[in-house]
Every structure is written in C-alpha cells, then in structure tokens.
C-alpha cells in the first residue's frame, strides 16, 4: 500500500484525490491518501510520497508557516531527510519547491517567476510535450508561474513549445500547470510508479 500525503493548504485538492484514484486504477498500485493540514499529520503515518497542489503561494506560506499549523517546515524537513522521497508540486506547489523560503536549499534546481504567464484572465489550455510520459498531455495553466532558469540538477520533464513547464530534481517533480484539472492521470501515475520503485509496498 502506497501512502500519499496531500497538502491541504489551498488549491484543487479534491481534484488531486480524484487523479490519484484514477492513477491507482491505471497502475494497479493500491494507495491511501492522507490529508496534511498541520505538522503533526506527518507524524501520524509513515508517508511514501507527497503532493503539493496549487493555490496562491503567499497565502500558502502564511497558512503553512503559522504556529498552529507549522506544516510547511515539517514538509520541507521530510523532503530533505531522504532524497529518494517522491514529490509532485503543481503551480504554487512548484513555487514552494523552487523557493521554500526557510533558509534551506531549493528543492528543485530551478528559479521561478510568480504569475509568469499573466493574470487569471490569461489562463489557457494547451497540449504540451510531456517528456516524462513520452507523449502529449493536456496542460491547464491558471495564473501559472514561469521557470526563469533551470540548473544542471534539473531534468526537463515538460515543454510548451520551447518553454520549460516541468522539471525534475531527484524524485521531485515541479509543474507550472495543473495536471489534476485534466482527465489524464499521467503525472499522478508517474508519482505512483516512482514511489513504488523506491519503497517496498506494505
């Protein structure tokens, strides 16, 4: 059984749950989704992977660093404890991976620009080249951040034309779009397959 933690600070969290359930059926990997709202939620179960949904990154930082929650510091510590731990960060989740803001090293080797694709009115959908999946994927971009620069430690995992929209460092995937808002569970399947490769299912 793969235990997946889902950060519940903001964003299309329930869409991620649906995508994970579809991915579970497609891959045949049984999963348990554990909702993470405060740091103690990470102590209550041994997680195998984490999903960091989108939302508004400033609000997510305020809520996730609040003394009552302290969720983000606990998540960043969990990620850094073991480089093998798979993480999928989408939109604002990608921003938090690139800029954790806790004084520690970035969790992906890339820099980002918030709202790099424009405002809410500039949101769009487009087929992207999902290099991680070896095929095209329906990209949904909503106030999407933009990768300004990628370092040597970042593998390019998705492109929109010449624009990089997905990168991977170790087992951490950061996407500037919202894969959970399509009916294609390919990136969530990647998360489950990567998790299964790293951990013995129990």
Image (cartoon, rainbow, N blue to C red):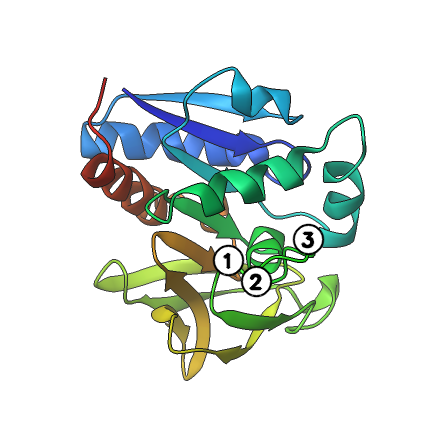
36 on left or right of 18: right
Quadrant of the drawing holding the C terminus? top left
| Residue shown at the point (47%, 47%) measured from the top left | 80
Asked where in the image residue 138 lies, by quadrant, the reply is bottom left
Q: Do the residues labelled 1 and 2 touch (CB within 8 Å)?
A: yes
Residue 182 makes an appearance in the image: no
Q: Give 108 or 133, whichever is nearer the viewer.
A: 108
Q: Which residue is drawn at 51% across and 71% down?
A: 110
**Which sits in the foreground, 106 or 15?**
106
Closer to the eye: label 2 or 3: 3
Q: Give me the C-alpha separation between circle 1 and circle 3.
A: 11 Å
Alpha-carbon distance for marks 1 and 2? 6 Å
Q: Mark 1 points at which residue?
A: 107
Image position of 158 (left or right of 104): left
Instruction: Give whichever of discs 1 and 2 has the lower sequence position.
Output: 2
For disc 2, the neighbor class at 10 Å (few under 14, some 14 to 19, many from 20) is: many
> Residue sitting at 63 percent across and 61 percent down?
99
In this picture, residue 38 sits left or right of residue 191: right
Q: Circle 2 is placed at which residue position?
A: 98
Earlier sequence position, callout 1 versus callout 3: 3
- Note whether 9 is above or below 136 in the view shown: above
């Amino acid at each position: 059984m793969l235990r997946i933690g889902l950060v519940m600070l903001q964003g299309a969290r329930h869409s991620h749950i649906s995508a994970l359930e579809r991915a579970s059926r497609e891959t045949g990997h049984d999963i348990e989704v554990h909702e993470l709202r405060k740091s103690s939620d990470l102590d209550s179960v041994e997680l195998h992977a984490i999903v960091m949904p989108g939302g508004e990154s400033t609000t997510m930082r305020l809520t996730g660093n609040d003394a009552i929650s302290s969720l983000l510091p606990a998540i960043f510590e969990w990620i850094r404890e073991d480089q093998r731990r798979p993480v999928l960060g989408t939109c604002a989740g990608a921003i938090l991976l690139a800029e954790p803001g806790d004084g520690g090293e970035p969790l992906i080797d890339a820099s980002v620009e918030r709202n790099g694709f424009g405002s809410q009115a500039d949101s769009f959908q487009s087929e992207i080249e999902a290099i991680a999946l070896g095929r095209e994927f329906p990209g949904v971009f909503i106030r999407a951040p933009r990768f300004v620069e990628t370092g040597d430690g970042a593998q390019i995992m998705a492109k929109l034309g010449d624009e990089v929209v997905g990168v991977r460092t170790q087992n951490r995937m950061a996407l500037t779009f919202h894969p959970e808002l399509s009916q294609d569970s390919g990136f969530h399947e990647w998360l489950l397959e990567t998790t299964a490769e790293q951990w013995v299912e129990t």
